[in-house]
Structure formats: structure tokens, C-alpha cells
Amino acid sequence: MEYVFIIGTFESIFLLLLLLGKKNKSLPDYLLGVIFMLYAISIGSVYLELQNLKNNPAYSAITNISWLFLFLHGPALWFYIKSLSDPDFRFKPLYLLHFIPFIFFSVFQYFNFISLTVPEKILFLENDLFKEMISYKITVLAIGVSTISYNSWALSLIRRRRDKLMQQYSKIEDIDLGWLNALTIAALICYSVNVALFTLDLIFHFATYKYLMFLTNIFATVYVLFLGYFGIRQGNIFINSMGVTRKSDVEPASNEIPSPAITTDDAFIRTLIRNMEEKQPYLDSEITISRLSELLDVKIEFLSEVLNSRLKQNFFDFINKYRIEEFKIQSILKANNHLSIMGIAYNCGFNSKASFYRAFRKFEGMSPTDYIERSHKK
């Protein structure tokens, strides 16, 4: 049973060392390293506590403290995802509030357990009598609220970041938030299962504390492996040319041409549509809202406001809708008979099969293949 703790601890240490050996480390890499370190401490301290109890306890100062580090897991994951999803992320004094639960329960644990004498600690831990105490039940619930809330918060960060990217880019495949979403969901599932086990035990008393720790650390060990493989493999999702959210793509430059004197949004919409039809900027697979605003000589904020408020579309859907319409035209041209479906899609501005098929189904309600077959039957 105790081999699980050893495996999890050394797995975390190995991944931490592997990460530290990575060249050109970014802030997210360091924060990922903090997560590995926390898992190594959390899992390793459980093992040390179990060994310590066998010796009644030889080192009482390190007994029954492993759970405290769980209050740091949520903030660590939040900081990691925040740094990945926000290229301008910087630590602020306000963020110290994230550590209040850890500090509070550390002080609480000092007066409730650490300050006790060794005989009192043995009595406290013997036969899991502490599980009947109100303080234990409050701690279990507090850990559950902390871990689940932080993981849910992290998921909302990812969703907001995705929405923001769709306001700026016509493609977001290179800015892969899918793996980050999967990572957070996996953490949420692990913590939810662990919290459920401890909460149910409060009611039904079906397992010893040692066995509960064994089960929960199995999940932790598997999750660390998952986190290490995908985290190090992915690196900083904003490290490539498309992934780096440049300030110029979000904010207008100081010398940007001011918005023309357009008396109504309707007039601008006509200008926008005319430019889309005549200059076909959507054929550029790298088109962004910054480039389109430069083409139209308007500010990014104004263009975004018109797209969202008047046309009820984000930039991502606005561009892809034109690409789909262009595909429908090109797919029936005899001059394109030698091209595959994706060959035509690439000519229309798409740069991946997944994004093209997803967009086509969204706007046409069918696959490109079905559409072409129906067109040929007409």
C-alpha cells in the first residue's frame, strides 16, 4: 500500500527535475514546477506520517500536517492557468489573499494539534478518534470547498480566454486551450472523487483514515503523471507566433489611424461588407481583428463593438462565415474539380480540417461532403 506514496513522490520529483532542466523556461513552467513540488510534499508527507506513526511517533512535529498543503493546490493550479491564459500576467499583492485559507488552518492546526504533547498526539490519532471531532469535519468540508472552487474558477478562466481569442483571431487551433481544459477537468474530477470519499466517510464511517489516504493518493499519483506529460509536452501555449497575444492585436497603437467620421453604424456595416466582398481579407488564414481594423481604418474597439452588438457575431464566426460561403462557390466550379475538399477549404482561408468541418456544420447543418453531393444532384 505504501508503495503508492513512494511512486507518487518520486514521480513528482522526477517531473520537477525534468522541468527545471528545460531550456528557455517561462513563468508558467516555474508555476508548473511549484505544482509538482506541492504534490511531492503532499504525497511524501503522507508517507512520512504513516512511517512516523509506526514509531509512536518518533517525529511528532511532522505528524498530521500533510492535509494543510491541499489548501495550496487550488491556488497553484489557478496561478498556472492564469499565467498560461494571460500573457500579461504578473503577480499582484492582492493575490496574497489566495493563501489566507492555508495560513488560517496552519494556525488552527498549531493550537489544535501541533502544540500538544506527544502522548496527547498519540491519543488524538489512535483508532481514528479525531475523525469524530467537529474540527476534522470542518477541515474536510473546507478542503472540498477550496479545491473544487479553485478548479471551477480555473475552468471559467479558460472559457473567458477562449471567448476573448475568438474576438481577436479567425483561427485558434494554434492557441490550444483544449489540453488545458482537459487538465483542469481531470483535476476537478480527482478532487471531487476525493472529497466525496471523505464526505461519505463522515456519514457512513466505511474506511480508516489510512485507507482513505491510500485511495486519494492513487488519484493524485495518476494525475501528476497526466499533468507532467501534457504540461511539459505543451509548454507555454503562447510561445509560437500565433499563440503570442501581442499587445498590438488587442490595443490600438498610439499612431493608429483614428476611426473615420461615420455617422451611423449602418454606414460602417455597408463599408465593412463591401470590403469583405471586394478585398476578401478572409482568404488570409492569419487574419486578425487588428489587421482587419487597419484595412478599414478604424479602431479595434469600434470594429469589435459593431460585430458583437449589430451583427451578433464574434470575429471568429464572422470571418469563418465568409470562408464557408466562398467554399460553397468554389466547390461547384469545374476549374476546381481536381482539388479535394480540403484543397478548396485551404484556398478559402481555413488551415485545418477540424476547424473547417466544425465551422461548416455550424453554419450549414451538414458536412461539406453532404453539401457537395446535394449540389451535384441539383
Image: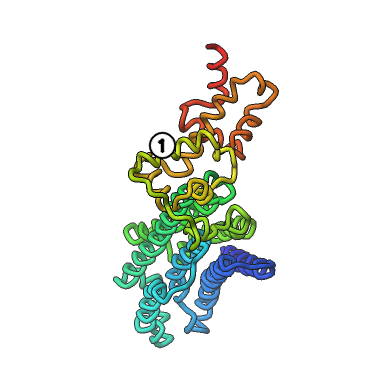
Q: Amino acid at mark 1?
A: Arg
213 sits to left or right of 2: left
The answer to whether residue 288 is above or below residue 376 is below
Look at the image and name its color scheme.
rainbow
How many numbered marks does the figure carry?
1
Outermost residue toward the front in this view: 261
The answer to whether residue 375 is above or below residue 62 is above
Outermost residue toward the top in this view: 378
Residue 51, how many percent across, how many down? 55, 75
* Residue 22 or residue 59, whichever sits in front: 22
Q: Dot 1: few (<14), some (14–19), or many (≥20) neighbours within 10 Å?
A: few
Quick check: can you spot residue 92? yes
Residue 308, how many percent across, how many down? 38, 44
The answer to whether residue 208 is above or below residue 188 is below
Residue 26, how many percent across, how many down? 60, 67
174 sits to left or right of 253: right
- Identify the residue at image location x=43%, y=86%: 118
* Residue 212 or residue 336, whichever sits in front: 336
- Identify the residue at image location x=44%, y=49%: 163
Residue at label 1?
270
